[in-house]
């Protein structure tokens, strides 16, 4: 039997922890006696039960939210698929570290810890139209970095990304995992013209053709068409499952990373909610494949984890209502409907 550096991650997928039904049931039972009509708080009620079940505790907590941004550079940028040079990735990492990006402000306002991990920015991945983007070892190292970046004390996780050219990479992953051509998945990203979108589509098609023999293996797809920051997000999302941490998914690039896990095991993203749907055209389609209904629709397309970080406020509100509301008995409010 041949072995692969991906074997331990495949093994994790065969041992996925499931939701704690005792905690989820306790949350549902509490929701039923709170001072409101049944279902009156809509998805907030579902979020509270979901948080309790995946944290494995009741009441659910919002004490240690964590936001992690992973950054990587991509050799496929040599094909002219981005409106910005790759130096911008370096510059934005510096901006994250200085606290000057949008994600820094959102993490701060929702009391989340923040960190950024730059993955070998001076050595972009290979151009996937010419060769595999990463070696198996390079890809596995990025997966492990993402796994290790998730703190065990975290009670809800947001992962984000920064990488010039990575909407093209995400579109290539989506096409490889779910089918279709480059034209079906390519979008404007950071603002390329219609001609630029067409160029992206052609580049994706060349990548799909070159790597056609591995498209049935999600981890090989990640290695051949992905990027280090995307692999790190795959590792972080999987790590969260084993650490009893619910995850809010961000935009198109993050969801392309999540799709690697979903294609490997259809239950792999049960501990994830979609924080928002972005303005990138492929994101709404990708969410349909992931069977995730977004919490927010605000036409955002920044990345960085920003849409999911904003959705932390919804989770925070859901738990404040669930944990803090009085029951009918405590408030001496009748729960009986008039006959």
Image (cartoon, rainbow, N blue to C red):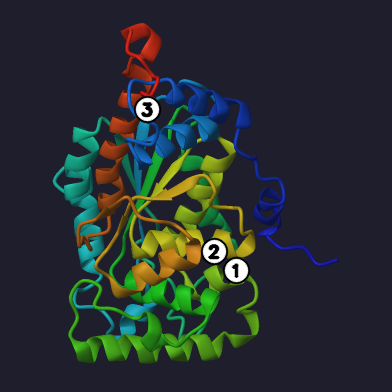
Q: Which mark is residue 260?
A: 2
Residue at x 71% of width, y 63% of height: 4
Q: Which mark is residue 64?
A: 3
The C terminus: image quadrant: top left
The x and y percentages for residue 243 are 55, 35
Compute the Cα span from label 2 to label 1.
5 Å
Q: Are marks 2 and 3 in contact (CB under 8 Å)?
A: no
139 versus 248 height, above or below: below
Residue at x 47% of width, y 73% of height: 173
167 versus 275 height, above or below: below
Q: Secondary structure at mark 1?
A: helix
In depth, the one of 93 and 220 nearer the eye is 220
Which residue reaches farthest left? 100
Task: Decide which of tag 3 and tag 1 comes sooner along the chain.
Answer: 3
Q: Are marks 3 and 1 in contact (CB under 8 Å)?
A: no
In depth, the one of 158 and 100 nearer the eye is 158
Q: Secondary structure at mark 3?
A: loop
- Residue designated by label 1: 218
The x and y percentages for residue 109 are 19, 34
Compute the Cα span from label 3 to label 1.
32 Å
Compute the Cα span from label 2 to label 3.
27 Å
Q: Are marks 2 and 1 in contact (CB under 8 Å)?
A: yes
The x and y percentages for residue 32 are 45, 25
Dot 2, crowdedness within 10 Å: few (<14), some or many (≥20)? many
Dot 3, crowdedness within 10 Å: few (<14), some or many (≥20)? some
Q: Secondary structure at mark 2?
A: helix
């Amino acid at each position: 039997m041949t072995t692969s550096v991906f074997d331990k991650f495949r093994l994790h997928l065969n041992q996925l922890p499931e939701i704690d039904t005792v905690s989820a049931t306790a949350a549902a039972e509490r929701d039923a006696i709170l001072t409101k009509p049944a279902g009156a708080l809509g998805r907030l009620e579902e979020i509270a039960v979901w948080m309790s079940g995946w944290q494995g505790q009741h009441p659910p907590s919002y004490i240690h939210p964590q936001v992690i941004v992973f950054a990587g550079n991509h050799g496929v940028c040599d094909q002219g698929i981005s409106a910005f040079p790759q130096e911008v990735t370096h510059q934005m990492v510096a901006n994250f570290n200085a606290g000057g990006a949008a994600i820094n402000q959102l993490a701060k306002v929702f009391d989340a810890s923040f960190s950024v991990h730059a993955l070998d920015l001076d050595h972009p991945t290979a151009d996937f139209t010419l060769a595999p983007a990463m070696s198996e070892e390079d890809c596995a190292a990025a997966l492990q970095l993402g796994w290790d970046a998730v703190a065990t004390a975290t009670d809800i996780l947001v992962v984000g990304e920064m990488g010039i050219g990575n909407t093209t990479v995400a579109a290539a992953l989506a096409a490889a995992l779910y089918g279709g051509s480059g034209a079906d998945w390519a979008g404007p990203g950071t603002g390329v013209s219609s001609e630029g979108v067409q160029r992206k589509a052609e580049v994706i098609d060349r990548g799909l053709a070159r790597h056609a023999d591995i498209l049935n293996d999600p981890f090989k797809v990640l290695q051949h068409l992905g990027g280090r920051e995307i692999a790190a997000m795959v590792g972080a999302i999987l790590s969260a499952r084993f650490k009893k941490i619910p995850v809010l998914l961000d935009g198109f690039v993050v969801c392309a990373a999540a799709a690697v896990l979903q294609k490997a095991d259809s239950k792999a993203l049960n501990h994830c909610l979609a924080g928002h749907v972005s303005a990138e055209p492929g994101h709404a389609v990708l969410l349909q494949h992931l069977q995730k209904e977004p919490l927010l629709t605000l036409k955002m397309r920044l990345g960085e984890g920003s849409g999911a970080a904003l959705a932390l406020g919804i989770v925070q509100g859901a738990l404040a209502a669930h944990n803090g509301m009085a029951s009918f008995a405590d408030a001496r409010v009748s729960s009986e409907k008039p006959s």
